[in-house]
C-alpha cells in the first residue's frame, strides 16, 4: 500500500532538503576562492592576459596593467616567479605586506581581520613553460559590492526552487483535498438519504489511506442504506400485519358487547387467543429489530454446546419428532451467541413444524474453508420452487401453508447470518423434505 503518510513526509522532506542544499551550495560557491577567481571581473582571465603582456611587451607594460587594475577595481595584484621573487614591483603597498607578515609571525591562519580577501592562483605560460603565482588582494567592500551585483544566477536558482516547492505543495494539497471533497460529498448524500454506492468507486481503487477509507465508507453506506431500507420495509410490513389481529380483536369485542352473558363467555377464549397471537407477533418483530441493533463485542460460540441446548429445549417443548444431531467435535466461532442460538432454534422449530412424527429432523455441523456449516433437514412436503427465493423475507409465508406462524422465523435467521457475514441457503432436498444451510464464518465479517 502506498501510504499517504510516507508520501507527504517524503515530499516535505525532499522540499526542505532541496532548499537547504541549494542554500548551502549557493553560500559555498559565493564564498569559494574558485568562484571569485572565475567570476570577479578584476581577476577573471587576468592571469593569461598579464603573462601574455609580460612576455610580449615587457615588464613596463605588465606593471602598467597591474596599476590599471588597481585604479579600476581597487585590487592589489602581486606576481611571483617560481623562486618566490616578485616579477615586477607590483601594486601592493608596504603597509599591506607588513600586516600580512605580522599575521604570519603570530601563527594565525585566519585572514578575516585583514581588510581584504587574499586569493592566489598559478598560471603556466604556454610559450615559455614558466610558472607564475598571482596574488590578489581584494578589499572586502569591493568584494561585497560585486557580490550584490552578481546574485542573478543564485536568485534564479532560488526562484526555480520556489517554483518546484510550489508545485510540490500544490500536488500534495490536491492529493489530500480532492479525496476529502469527494468524501464530504458522499457524507452529504448519505445524510440526505441519496447516497450512491458507486460514487466513491474510483477513490476506493486507490492504494493508500484514502482508498481504505473510501472502501470502508462504501461498506458503511451500503450497510446504512440496507438498514434504512429494511426498517422502512419492516414498518410497512408491521403496519400491514398488525391490522389483521387488531381487526379480529375489534370484531370479537363488538360481538362480546352485543352478546348475551352465556355467548360472551364463549368469546373470551377467542379474545385471549388473538391477544396471544398479537403478543407473539410483537415479540418476533422486536427480535428481528434487535438483530440489526446488536453492538456487543463478538464472543466465542461453542456450536456443540449450542446444538445440545437447542435440542434439549425442543424436547422440553413436548415435540414427538426425533432429532438427530451430528456435529464435529470442537466447533467454535467468534460471534454473538444469542443471535446464533436464535437462528438455529428457528430453523429447528421450522423443521419440527413441518416434519412428520415418524421421520427425524437431521442436524449436521461441519467446518470447511473457514466457515462452519449448520444444516437442518426435515422430511416434510418442502416448498414450491417458485417461492424459495422469497423465503426469509419478513412476513412472507408460502401460499397454502397450514402451520401457525408469522413469517418471521426465517427472516430472523437470515438477518443473524448476515450480521455475522454469513449466508442462509434454503432449498428442497433431492431425497425429499426441506433443507436449510446456515453458513457462518469463524470470524465475523461486516456484511456488504
Image (tube, rainbow, N blue to C red):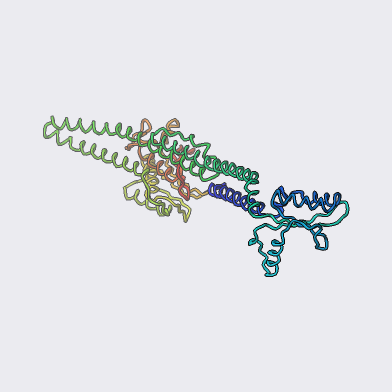
Residue 80: x and y in percent read 80, 59
Residue projecting furthest to the bottom: 106
**Left or right: where does residue 298 sit relative to residue 79?**
left
Question: How far across and how far down the image is residue 26, in percent?
Answer: 64, 50
Q: Please name whichever residue, 284 or 273, is drawn nearer the observer in this view of the structure.
A: 284
Q: Position of residue 304 (x, y in %)?
A: 43, 53
Viewer-side residue, 69 vs 110: 69
Left or right? Give the position of 245 relative to 310.
Answer: left
Which residue appears at 80% of the width and 54% of the height? 123
Does any portion of residue 41 appear in the rendered image?
yes
Q: Is residue 1 visible in this depiction of the protein?
A: no
**Residue 21 x, y percent position in the rendering:** 62, 52
The answer to whether residue 347 is left or right of residue 60 is left
Q: Tally the marks.
A: 0
The one nearer the camera, 139 or 60, is 60
Check the image and name the residue furthest to the right.
128
Residue reaching furthest left? Answer: 261
Looking at the picture, tell me which residue is in the foreground, 49 or 109: 49
Amino acid at each position: 500500500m502506498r501510504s499517504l503518510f510516507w508520501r507527504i513526509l517524503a515530499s516535505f522532506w525532499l522540499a526542505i532538503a532541496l532548499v537547504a542544499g541549494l542554500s548551502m551550495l549557493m553560500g559555498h560557491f559565493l564564498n569559494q576562492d574558485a568562484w571569485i577567481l572565475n567570476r570577479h571581473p578584476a581577476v577573471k582571465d587576468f592571469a593569461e592576459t598579464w603573462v601574455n603582456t609580460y612576455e610580449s611587451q615587457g615588464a613596463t607594460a605588465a606593471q602598467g596593467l597591474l596599476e590599471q587594475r588597481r585604479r579600476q577595481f581597487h585590487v592589489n595584484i602581486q606576481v611571483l616567479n617560481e623562486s618566490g621573487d616578485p616579477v615586477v614591483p607590483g601594486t601592493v603597498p608596504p603597509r599591506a605586506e607588513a600586516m600580512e607578515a605580522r599575521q604570519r609571525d603570530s601563527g594565525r591562519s585566519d585572514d578575516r581581520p585583514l581588510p581584504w580577501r587574499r586569493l592566489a592562483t598559478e598560471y603556466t605560460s604556454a610559450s615559455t613553460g614558466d610558472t607564475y603565482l598571482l596574488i590578489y588582494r581584494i578589499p572586502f567592500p569591493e568584494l561585497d559590492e560585486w557580490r550584490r551585483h552578481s546574485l542573478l544566477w543564485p536568485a534564479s536558482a532560488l526562484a526555480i526552487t520556489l517554483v518546484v516547492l510550489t508545485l510540490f505543495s500544490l500536488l500534495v494539497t490536491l492529493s489530500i483535498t480532492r479525496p476529502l471533497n469527494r468524501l464530504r460529498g458522499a457524507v452529504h448524500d448519505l445524510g440526505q438519504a441519496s447516497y450512491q454506492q458507486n460514487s466513491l468507486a474510483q477513490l476506493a481503487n486507490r492504494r493508500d489511506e484514502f482508498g481504505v477509507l473510501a472502501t470502508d465508507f462504501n461498506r458503511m453506506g451500503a450497510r446504512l442504506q440496507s438498514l434504512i431500507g429494511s426498517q422502512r420495509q419492516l414498518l410497512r410490513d408491521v403496519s400491514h400485519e398488525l391490522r389483521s389481529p387488531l381487526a379480529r380483536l375489534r370484531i370479537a369485542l363488538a360481538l362480546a358487547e352485543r352478546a348475551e352473558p352465556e355467548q360472551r363467555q364463549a368469546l373470551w377464549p377467542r379474545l385471549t387467543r388473538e391477544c396471544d397471537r398479537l403478543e407473539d407477533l410483537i415479540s418476533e418483530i422486536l427480535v428481528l429489530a434487535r438483530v440489526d441493533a446488536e453492538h456487543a463485542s463478538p464472543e466465542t460460540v461453542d456450536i456443540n454446546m449450542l446444538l445440545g441446548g437447542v435440542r434439549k429445549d425442543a424436547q422440553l417443548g413436548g415435540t414427538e419428532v426425533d432429532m438427530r444431531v451430528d456435529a464435529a467435535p470442537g466447533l467454535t466461532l467468534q460471534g454473538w451467541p444469542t443471535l446464533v442460538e436464535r437462528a438455529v432454534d428457528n430453523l429447528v422449530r421450522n423443521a419440527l413444524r413441518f416434519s412428520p412424527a415418524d421421520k427425524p429432523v437431521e442436524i449436521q455441523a461441519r467446518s470447511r474453508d473457514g466457515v462452519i456449516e449448520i444444516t437442518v433437514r426435515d422430511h416434510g412436503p418442502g416448498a414450491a420452487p417458485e417461492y424459495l427465493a422469497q423465503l426469509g423475507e419478513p412476513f412472507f409465508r408460502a401460499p397454502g401453508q397450514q402451520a401457525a406462524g408469522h413469517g418471521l422465523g426465517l427472516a430472523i435467521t437470515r438477518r443473524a447470518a448476515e450480521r455475522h457475514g454469513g449466508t442462509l441457503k434454503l432449498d428442497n432436498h433431492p431425497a425429499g423434505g426441506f433443507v436449510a444451510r446456515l453458513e457462518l464464518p469463524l470470524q465475523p465479517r461486516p456484511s456488504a
